[in-house]
Image (cartoon, rainbow, N blue to C red):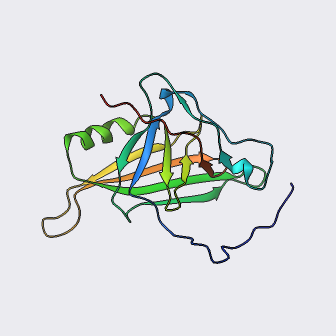
Amino acid sequence: MDLFDLKGPNGADNTPGLLGYVLIAAEEDFTTIAKAPKVAGAAGSTAVIVADHVFAAGKGFVKVYITLASNELKAAVVGERDGRGLKINFEGFHPGNKAEALEFANKVKNIGLIMLVPDPDGGYLQVGTEGLPCELSADYSSAKLDSGRRGFTVKGEAYATGLFLYQGDITMKPAV
């Protein structure tokens, strides 16, 4: 392992949190799911996916609104010595109970996804890879009449060898 210096922010912003949306696509909609290189070039290069994801015709990412400041992405080391990886967890809130949200919740619970999570710096963290997709669940609450928020707590989880930044082009699903 060729280690390198890891410096602090040196006065640069390190804004916490995530933006108010995520991008998701079904694993089956891709013809090619890009990967980060296995062989290191410049420092950090094996944690960045620079190639573009390629989709089947008429497919692409869809944008899911998440209430600002309700979302968080965490990654924890799991496994035993000689077999460690990451378990990545996402949580956010999608308000309301419109028919589209109810249908979304019914569909995503049974499919593997690739999810791009935007950070305040303008980058995207990718959750899910080919063969190790992100799985979403959307837990509903009506809330109480005098308090709370009505809608879905969206939870995602994936196992991974590491966290990756996605810097390829983003293809959105064409409007119907």
Q: Which residue is situated farthest in the right direction here?
A: 2
The spot of residue 169 in percent (x, y) is 55, 39
Q: Which residue is situated farthest in the left direction here?
A: 145
Q: Residue at x 20, y 40 (%)?
A: 99
**Quadrant assignment, res 75:** bottom right
Q: Residue at x 44, y 44 (%)?
A: 23
Q: Which residue is situated farthest in the top direction here?
A: 57
Query: In the visual, does 64 lie left or right of 47?
Result: left
Q: Is residue 161 visible?
A: no
Q: Residue at x 50, y 69 (%)?
A: 16
The spot of residue 91 in percent (x, y) is 42, 57
Query: In the visual, does 72 lie left or right of 65?
Result: right
Q: Residue at x 36, y 62 (%)?
A: 68
Query: In the visual, does 98 lie left or right of 160?
Result: left
Q: Quadrant of the C terminus?
A: top left
Query: In the visual, does 17 lie left or right of 153?
Result: right
Judge whether 48 appears above or below 144 on screen. Answer: above
- From the viewer's side, name the closer residue of 112 and 30: 30
Q: Which residue is situated farthest in the bottom direction here?
A: 11
Q: Quadrant of the N terminus?
A: bottom right
The spot of residue 137 in percent (x, y) is 39, 46
Q: Is residue 123 visible?
A: yes
**Quadrant assignment, res 8:** bottom right
